[in-house]
Image (spheres, helix red, strand yellow):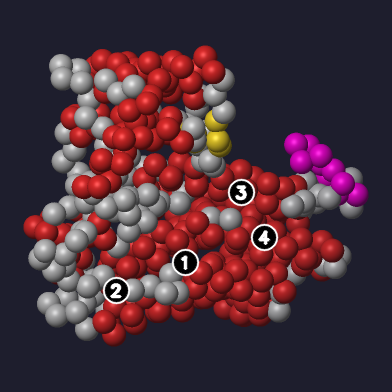
């Protein structure tokens, strides 16, 4: 019985236009973000730049101060201050008093006067490539890290929320490429410890997780509302199949139909890794499957469960608004962990690089707990959906009545 219901639910989903729009969005997003993916070649000693092989993590306070001061001087010179109060860029216009205060802060930090900045920038990039080098300014001798942070706190106060001048953001924004030895180490982690395919499977999950955190709710809400639009509730309620079988098969079918195109798309980066023929790479041929099921499946389960629960509870498209808000907050929180190794409890874990195997390995236990927690949450929401559905079959919580009330049907009355 349940297999028959499962097949019917898969068939109904496949006949839906919104489902094929979902598939089209996945395909377009994948090929726009990863379609031209190039497998990282081995580093060559003496090459001009190693930024493709990662950035140093052993950052000193001096380097934070020089990079932070450079960022502030650059923004002042071009009069271009950018903050990210809700994750999106906001350009800040300062008045003359605020500009003068920024100028004074720059002088206290670096000793540079306004008319000396242009020459300092020109001298810096005469000795460094502008495409690959972050502009830095030497700070005054004797300036302590605490004094530097105090000045930067004032800059952050002037610019408002979401500036790059808090201590955490100043540290994150220092991007010093690794040297040859560091590049070799990171590349060996990618090819030997990560089996090459593991790194690109994580990158695939990073990109696809963003769209899978929102798109499935549209398909789910439409599927749940279809019976109401076609006035099929009474017929379905009268069937002999249990509520667990009806809703359970629908939940399983929606998950499978959402994951099917994801599984197929993940074969592309895996094939590219295999085709690259990197010597010494210990290829993980099934990495794509492990990451799809371990990383992306819990996200899909959660989004579908939210869609079913909210739609069955309210018989409206409220699920889209609820999931949209959750998705937005998840994307904003995930922006701080783009480099990987900082997964927390986010619905959409981020790891926007094929490198940083060390960060992944060190935080794997947290990621595993995160994913298992969302599986558990999904199953709880699915169970609540079944409970609500069962109550409606018995005449309670029915359409046109208050959800909070425990009313009997006219027949029972």
In this rendering, the answer to whether 392 lies above or below 97 is: below
Residue 55 locus on image (x, y percent): 23, 50
Q: Please tell me whether residue 407 belongs to the stretch shown in magenta.
A: yes
Mark 1 vs mark 2: which is more N-terminal? 1
Gap between marks 3 and 4, in whole Å?
A: 10 Å
Residue 360 locus on image (x, y percent): 25, 53
Give the structural element (helix, strand or loop) at label 4.
Answer: helix
Q: Which stretch appears magenta?
A: 400-410
Mark 2 vs mark 4: which is more N-terminal? 2
Residue 387 locus on image (x, y percent): 64, 51
Q: Quick check: 396 left or right of 165?
A: right
Q: Which residue position is annotated with label 3? A: 323
Q: Residues within 10 Å of mark 2 (few under 14, many from 20)?
A: some
Give the structural element (helix, strand or loop) at label 3.
Answer: helix
Gap between marks 3 and 2, in whole Å?
A: 35 Å
Q: Which residue position is annotated with label 4? A: 218
Which label belongs to residue 39? 2
Which label belongs to residue 158? none
Gap between marks 1 and 3, in whole Å?
A: 23 Å
In this rendering, the answer to whether 261 lies above or below 304 is: below
Q: Residues within 10 Å of mark 4 (few under 14, many from 20)?
A: some
Residue 252 occupies which quadrant of the picture?
bottom right
Q: Main secondary structure of the magenta part?
A: loop
Mark 1 vs mark 3: which is more N-terminal? 1
Please report the residue visible at 77 percent of the width from the left and 41 percent of the height from the top.
Answer: 403
Gap between marks 2 and 4, in whole Å?
A: 34 Å
Q: Which residue position is annotated with label 1? A: 33
């Amino acid at each position: 019985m349940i297999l028959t219901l499962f097949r019917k639910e898969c068939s109904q989903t496949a006949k839906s236009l919104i489902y094929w729009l979902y598939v089209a969005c996945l395909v377009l997003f994948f090929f726009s973000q990863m379609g031209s993916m190039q497998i990282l070649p081995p580093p060559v000693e003496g090459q001009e730049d190693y930024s493709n092989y990662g950035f140093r993590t052993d950052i000193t306070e001096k380097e934070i101060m020089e990079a932070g001061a450079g960022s502030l001087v650059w923004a002042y010179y071009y009069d271009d201050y950018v903050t990210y109060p809700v994750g999106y860029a906001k350009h800040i216009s300062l008045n003359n008093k605020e500009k003068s205060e920024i100028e004074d802060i720059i002088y206290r930090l670096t000793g540079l006067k306004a008319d000396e900045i242009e020459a300092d920038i020109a001298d810096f990039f005469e000795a460094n490539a502008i495409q690959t080098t972050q502009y830095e300014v030497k700070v005054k001798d004797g300036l302590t890290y605490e004094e530097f942070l105090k000045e930067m706190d004032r800059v952050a106060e002037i610019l408002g929320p979401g500036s790059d001048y808090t201590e955490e953001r100043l540290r994150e924004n220092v991007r010093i490429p690794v040297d040859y030895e560091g590049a070799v180490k990171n590349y060996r982690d990618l090819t030997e410890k990560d089996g090459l395919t593991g790194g690109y499977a994580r990158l695939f999950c990073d990109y696809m997780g963003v769209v899978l955190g929102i798109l499935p709710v549209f398909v789910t809400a439409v599927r749940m509302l279809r019976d109401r639009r076609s006035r099929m509730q009474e017929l379905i309620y009268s069937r002999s199949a249990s509520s667990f079988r009806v809703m359970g098969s629908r939940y399983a079918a929606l998950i499978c139909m959402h994951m099917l195109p994801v599984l197929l798309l993940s074969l592309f980066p895996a094939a590219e890794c295999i085709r690259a023929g990197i010597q010494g790479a210990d290829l993980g041929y099934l990495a794509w499957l492990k990451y799809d099921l371990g990383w992306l499946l819990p996200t899909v389960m959660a989004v579908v469960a939210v869609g079913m629960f909210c739609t069955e509870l309210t018989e409206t498209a409220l699920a889209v608004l609820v999931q949209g808000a959750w998705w937005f907050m998840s994307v904003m929180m995930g922006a701080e962990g783009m480099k990987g190794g900082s997964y927390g409890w986010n619905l959409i874990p981020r790891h926007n690089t094929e490198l940083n195997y060390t960060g992944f390995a060190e935080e794997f236990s947290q990621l595993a707990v995160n994913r298992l927690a969302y599986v558990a949450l999904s199953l709880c929401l699915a169970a609540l959906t079944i409970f609500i559905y069962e109550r409606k079959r018995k005449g309670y919580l029915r359409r046109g009545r208050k959800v909070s009330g425990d009313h009997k049907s006219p027949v029972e009355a």
